[in-house]
Image (tube, grey):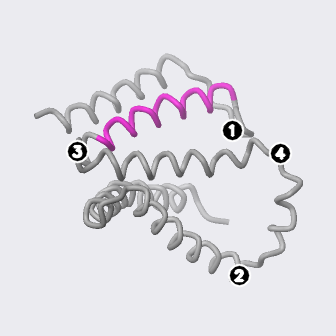
Amino acid sequence: MPSNLTYALIMLAAGFGIPILAALNAALGTRIGSPAAAGAILFTVALIATAAVVLVTGPAPLKLAPSAPKPLFLAGLLVAFYVLSITWIAPKFGVGNAVFFVLLGQLASAAVIDHFALFGARQAPLTLMRSAGIAVMAFGVYLTQRA
């Protein structure tokens, strides 16, 4: 079983990739003249990549998908909203500014999800210390984006 360090490093890499994704897809959207088309291309590539992983790891779990609660599939709409909005806004607002506000939204949303253990998440109460940590993180992100 992977260690917490392994999990942290994988998520650090994922976090590192988000601004790169934003910059690349924003540039593609600008170059081809359509953020929506750039999003469709991104999702096509992502579908091929995830389908390859499913084939390698075994497609049997896909049979369970129809029995999953339907609200869980809203995640697809949320990722589409993120990709389309960042692709459209980043060229006009800047990748750093766009990701700054995404990070603020992630901090607030993650705190609520963890506090109430929503969607089956592990519960982590929003204590004063945790709130202070989130505030320091948010302030740090703000400082990185000040002109």
The answer to whether 128 is drawn above or below residue 28 in the figure is above
| Mark 2–mark 1 distance (CA, rounded to whole Å) | 29 Å
Q: Which residue is mark 1?
A: 122
Please name the residue shown 49% across and 62% down the image: 10
Quarter of the image where the N terminus is located: bottom right
Mark 1: secondary structure: loop
Report the amino acid beneath label 4. Pro
* For marks 2 and 4 on the same chain, the one whose residue lies earlier in the sequence: 2
Tell me whether the residue at label 2 lies in contact with that at label 4, contact meaning CB atoms closer than 8 angstroms.
Answer: no
Report the amino acid beneath label 1. Arg
| Mark 2–mark 4 distance (CA, rounded to whole Å) | 24 Å
Q: Which residue is mark 4?
A: 69
| Mark 4–mark 3 distance (CA, rounded to whole Å) | 38 Å
| Mark 3–mark 1 distance (CA, rounded to whole Å) | 37 Å
| Mark 4–mark 1 distance (CA, rounded to whole Å) | 19 Å
Q: Looking at the picture, how far across and down is residue 42, in whole percent?
A: 46, 66
The 10 Å Cα crowd at callout 4, few under 14, some 14 to 19, many 20 or more, is few
Report the amino acid beneath label 2. Leu
Looking at the rendered image, the disc whose residue lies closer to the viewer, 3 or 1, is 3
Mark 3: secondary structure: helix
* For marks 3 and 2 on the same chain, the one whose residue lies earlier in the sequence: 2
Please name the residue shown 41% across and 54% down the image: 15
The 10 Å Cα crowd at callout 1, few under 14, some 14 to 19, many 20 or more, is few
- Read off the magenta span: 98-116
Query: Foreground residue, 110 or 46?
Result: 46
